[in-house]
Image: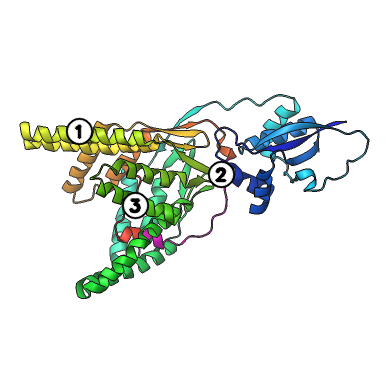
Amino acid sequence: MLTYRLLFNPQPLPGFSLQQVQQHLQQLLKLNDNQLRALYMTPGKVLKKDLAKDKAEAYRQYLARYGIAVTLEPQLELEPGPAPEEHPVAAGRAVFAVSEPPQQQSQTQHAANLGERPAPIRERRVPMEFTGDGREYFGIWIVNVVLTILTLGIYSAWAKVRTRKYFYGHSILDGNNFQYLADPKVILKGRIIAFFALVIWNLTTNFMPILSLVLLLAIVPAIPWVLARSLRFNAINSAYRGVRFNFTGSYGGAAKVVLLWPFVSAITFSLGLPLSLQQKHKYQVENSHYGLSQFRFNGTLIDYYLFGLKILLVIIAAGALSVIAHPLIGLLGYLLVFGYFMASLSNLYLNNVELAGNRIESTLSKRTTVWIYFTNSILILLTLGLYTPWAKVRMARYRAECTTFIINSDLDKFVGTQQAQVNALGQELGDMFDMDIAAF
């Protein structure tokens, strides 16, 4: 009887990174780090054997959904009866137990049983939607403001969670909304620690300047930790379709983002600014995960230097207008600079984000961005801040209208992992000291 076995191919399938595939292997095959290394030491290790052709093909299709490449090799049984079990390390090949493909893969199994390849998933363009309403959000916003004042700031943690839950819950992609899962009590603990840190800093600055310098030397190395912890806290408390995001950036990577590259930019008289910005975006994106899948960032240095050159030319043109024509004309020119910068940077960032072959397309208009920011600012001033909820909803809706997800795979293939609880201290220190950790 002709049977087949699955031989492992260490080369990831197109659209998957090596790190993604390794994470999937550990999840699906229940491998520890040593077993994973052993698997990659000798290509062609046996994952499963003694399979009928249709069953072997079903396994191949199932593993391909996670970027794992395997080869089907026929094995001919010369004698009837069960074949003797191969020792796990015999002949340099380890046999791993691959679990049965889940029932939700029945379409793939059916195609395999028929000896057919399943139809490829066609590219879909799915627009982002934001369904929030200014009047509805005003009710949440005004309660947040009043309770935060009455509780001397204690309610601010709950206010933050309520706000994010509202905007996440009204952000719709492919019929499903995003979720924000943070616990307000965890955020409050971080804010209390951050508050006392700020008080100590102010007291030492005013009464013990020398000690404040010592504290400054201690604070600077902590800034990368604050950045990395804040990004991780935000990521693991964000979810889509029940699958959490994650952030695994290291302290060393964060130190380059907030200390090294800004220093390079300073000593090169801002010539290194595009490099600093590109490295920051790359750090944020490529250390982010959705379930077991890692994001990729395709933005190049050339893209960022061209962006910087365009911004410089617009600034020069605005300055020339203010000198030649009128200062008010120059002010309008600088508003255009602001709009061009915000819209172009958002487009540059989002258009280079990729997740397992799925991409984002952002088409923010510079002119419309300037108009929204300008009119929002005027209306907030005229209403003494009461227009703020409508302004936030208006900008969120516009960003959603200009964002399209280009989906080239089945969203059900993403596998979630349980993340350890992370305290909010890093994020709240960033808030208290007004550190910029946003992408744009």
CA distance separating discs 2 and 3 = 26 Å
The residue labelled by disc 2 is 19
Q: Main secondary structure of the magenta part?
A: loop
Q: Amino acid at mark 1?
A: Val
Residue at horizontal 43%, vertical 64%? 185
What's the mark number on residue 260?
3
Question: Which residues make up the magenta segment?
Answer: 414-428
Estimate the x, y position of residue 103 in percent, counting from the top left.
70, 39
Residue 259 found in image quarter:
bottom left
Looking at the image, tell me whether mark 3 or mark 1 is earlier in sequence order: 3
Position of 87 relative to 216 (above/below): above
Residue type of the residue flagged with mark 2: Gln
Residue displayed at 63% across by 25% down: 119
Residue assigned mark 1: 314
What amino acid is at disc 3?
A: Leu
Q: In what element is the residue under mark 1?
A: helix
Q: Nearer the viewer, mark 3 or mark 1?
A: 3
Residue 357 is labelled as none
From the viewer's perspective, is 232 left or right of 196? right
Q: Nearer the viewer, mark 2 or mark 3?
A: 3
Q: Residue at x 32, y 57 (%)?
A: 143
The answer to whether the residues at label 2 and label 3 have Cβ atoms under 8 Å apart is no
